[in-house]
Image: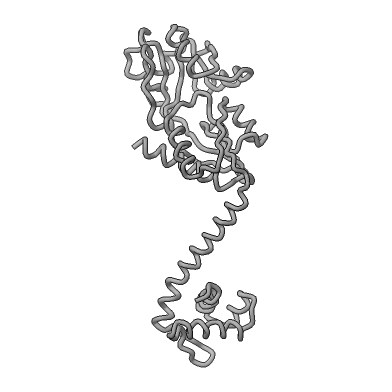
Amino acid sequence: MLFRQLKYFITVVRCQSFTEAAEECFISQSAISQQIKALEQELGVDLLKREGRHFSLTPAGSYLYDHGQSLLDEVEELKKETIRRGLDNDTELRIGFPKNFSTPELSTSIAEFSKLYPEVNISIISGTHEELFALLLEHRIDMKISEQRRAYDPDYENVELTHSRSYIEISARHPLAGQTVIDTEDLSKLTCILVVSKGQEESERNFYEQTLRLSHRFAYAYSLEEARLMVLSHRGYFPIDVLGQMPETVPGVKRIPLYRHQKPISRNYFACWEKKQSTYYIEEFAALLKKVIQQLDE
């Protein structure tokens, strides 16, 4: 049984007309009729019960139509995916993530993705929210993982990963370290340590001061490790978002849930990439990361 014969048969039944089916398949009516007769001869059964210009399905024909349509759909999907993979010539995936982003889900996803697609070289670039946005616009990264600070742009795919839980890390010797939760009002007179890139201090400060209503005093670190050393030396507290699971804090540091007006602060994290630049590998990594986060968060 040839694939085209099955396609002709399905089309004839769906259109309920040899003439319309022939037009849709761009062949003559006599040719499509001959192909279906050849299919019946090969199978050794009648598929159509012909009654003048009309026809009805035999039990065998009904079975072939019901199951043949699913087969055609699978073949079409197989064709599309094969073409997409063939067109995705770039074997590098460049992922941008926030500088204050520390979660095992990302490393787990990269490890699993590398097992599935060893031909793809993964590059990891960290930066502030604004830096990642600029890198994506300039096509210097393929996708970014970050919290939502802007309205969704219709030219970009935005796959929601999870809602973060906001915490602060503070010295275990600080008087606030014994609290089970900390409200933003409790932090108004303390120094907030932000993990930034050089030149991005002001934009990050504006976000945390005006949007999250944190402290009015800020200090800056350029890595997670530096921020935690500053916390240990009583230079301030460090805000951090938790997605899924989070490793234990370093000795001497307490991690406490952050609230505002007695409600926990939560932010939406998503994977984002330009629709015109979308590839099979980008979509696969985003789906895998979301799956890993959901599994480890259960």
Given residues 184 and 14, the one toward you in this image is 14
- Position of 183 with respect to 120 (left or right) is left
Whether residue 152 is visible, yes or no, is no
Picture quarter containing residue 83? bottom right
Q: Position of residue 275 (x, y in %)?
A: 61, 45
Q: Residue at x 53, y 15 (%)?
A: 221
- Position of 124 with respect to 250 (left or right) is right
- Position of 23 with respect to 268 (left or right) is right
Find the residue positioned furthest to the bottom: 52
Given residues 262 and 287, the one toward you in this image is 287
Q: Residue at x 41, y 17 (%)?
A: 169
In the rendered image of this protein, does residue 39 appear above or below residue 133?
below
Given residues 182 and 291, the one toward you in this image is 291
Q: Position of residue 208 (x, y in %)?
A: 52, 20
Q: Looking at the rendering, in which quadrant would you find the C terminus?
A: top left
Find the residue positioned furthest to the right: 138
In the rendered image of this protein, does residue 4 appear above or below residue 49?
above
Q: Residue at x 54, y 21 (%)?
A: 210
Whether residue 102 is visible, yes or no, is yes
In the rendered image of this protein, does residue 62 appear above or below residue 295?
below
Picture quarter containing residue 228? top left
- Position of 50 with respect to 85 (left or right) is left
